Amino acid sequence: LKTSPSIFLVASVNLNTVFVSTEEPKVIGSHDTITAAVGEDVILPCHLEPPFDVHNLTVLWKHNGAAVHTYKSRGDNLDAQDKSFKNRTLFFHGEMVNGNISLKLFNVTEQDKGVYTCVVPRLDSQVRKGNRIISPPPRFLFSSFSLLPRMHFFFSLQTWWKLNVFF
């Protein structure tokens, strides 16, 4: 019996399932309140539904008309960013494949209060804006004094502010 060498070829084929939706993507924001004290960090949530990779799209975040953060051509484009937001914003690049276009704002200041907008211009008429209010917890200022050795008076003053965010 003569045997000949056999060659086995094993081929692996990966099939990726692609989700195709007939629904136009929409920019979705939350209407819930975000609470942050001065100096804290906040996440301004925004995403697309249905979820899809937004790496090739332009995403604009604005605050009272000023540029907070711009994502364009697969990267951050901060040339037009308002100087008050310089080095204080972050996109979640790893989550953009799922339509997450939320923005992290570091070191919140009282000047951050106002209207925020998240826009994806390419979606044309499907751009949706949502409302968001960011307000820090109440701050209390305490003062005391005494007129007599055993009598003390305490005063407190409550202050707060709001930061409105629109998507």
Image (cartoon, grey):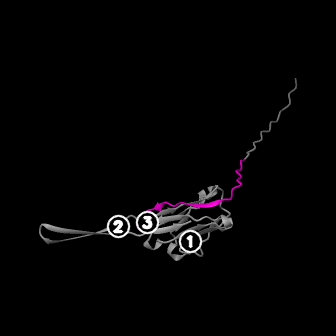
Q: Main secondary structure of the magenta part?
A: loop
Q: Which residue is mark 2?
A: 139
CA–CA distance in space, label 1 to label 3: 18 Å
Question: Horizontal and vertical percent for residue 20?
Answer: 71, 52
CA–CA distance in space, label 2 to label 1: 27 Å
User: What amino acid does circle 3 point to?
Assistant: Ser
- Tell me which numbered mark, 1 or 3, is placed earlier along the sequence: 1
Residue 28 in magenta? yes
Position of the C terminus by quadrant = bottom right
Residue at the limit of the structure toward the left, as seen here: 149
Q: Which residue is mark 3?
A: 135
User: What amino acid does circle 2 point to?
Assistant: Arg
CA–CA distance in space, label 3 to label 2: 11 Å
- Tell me which numbered mark, 2 or 1, is placed earlier along the sequence: 1
Residue 95 bears which disc, if any? none
Q: Is residue 19 above or below residue 122?
A: above
Q: Which residue is mark 1?
A: 62
Residue at image location 14% in from the left, 68% down from the top: 151
Residues in magenta, as a range: 16-38
